[in-house]
């Protein structure tokens, strides 16, 4: 049985693995290996994740995890970007566990936190252009395209783009 819960330090290694594997599976054909590993090293290292599961706030509500038989199979988190808007900053599954409803359950947990604790009325997400896994997922859950912007982490010679989506919650 899959359990969705707020992450704690015992989940750190699983979060790092599922986010790293999910990121590689998502962007392996659209982004350079150098870019992928640079982003993974920045966001999905164990030291950062330990901090992110132990230090939460309105701006970072912490990680939620999907756990089955003691193993993290999905992870996601977000925070508030202004007084009334939340954002999903990260949401990844074990690449072998996609299309089982796990991502939806994690999104529901993140949304519930943002609505009930922080009084969000809208929710945003950035999806890298070309992410043919994430775009249909968010569109099916009521997010609509708003605009395009430069992607996070671009270095000289890189021109990755992010698509900004939002929905009322």
Image: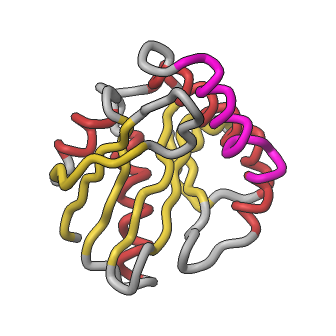
Outermost front residue: 156
Residue that appears at 29% across and 52% down:
164
Depth check: give the residue in front, 163 or 103: 163
The vertical placement of 31 against 42, above or below, is above
- Residue 144 location in percent, x, y? 16, 52
Vertical placement of 65 versus 82: above or below?
A: above
Query: What is the span of residues highlighted in magenta in the rendered image?
Result: 32-48
Seen from the viewer's position, the closer of residues 169 and 106 is 169
Please name the residue shown 59% across and 43% down the image: 67
- The question of residue 41 being in magenta is answered with yes
Please report the residue visible at 52 percent of the width from the left and 57 percent of the height from the top. Answer: 77
Residue 111 position in % (x across, y down) = 36, 66
The C terminus: image quadrant: bottom left
Q: Position of residue 117 (x, y in %)?
A: 45, 83
Q: Residue furthest top?
A: 29
Is residue 120 inside the magenta stretch?
A: no
């Amino acid at each position: 049985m899959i359990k969705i819960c707020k992450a704690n330090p015992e989940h750190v290694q699983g979060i790092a693995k599922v986010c790293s594997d999910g990121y590689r599976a998502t962007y392996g054909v659209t982004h350079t290996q150098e870019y992928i590993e640079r982003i993974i090293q920045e966001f999905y290292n164990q030291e950062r994740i330990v901090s992110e599961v132990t230090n939460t706030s309105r701006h970072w509500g912490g990680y939620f995890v999907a756990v089955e038989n003691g193993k993290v199979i999905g992870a996601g988190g977000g925070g508030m970007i202004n007084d009334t808007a939340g954002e999903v900053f990260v949401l990844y599954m074990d690449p072998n566990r996609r299309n089982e409803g796990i991502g939806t359950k994690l999104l529901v947990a993140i949304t519930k936190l943002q609505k009930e604790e922080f009084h969000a009325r809208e929710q945003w997400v950035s999806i890298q252009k070309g992410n043919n896994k994430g775009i249909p997922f968010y569109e099916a859950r009521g997010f609509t395209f708003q605009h395009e912007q430069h992607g996070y982490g671009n270095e000289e010679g890189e021109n990755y783009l992010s698509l900004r989506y939002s929905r009322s919650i």
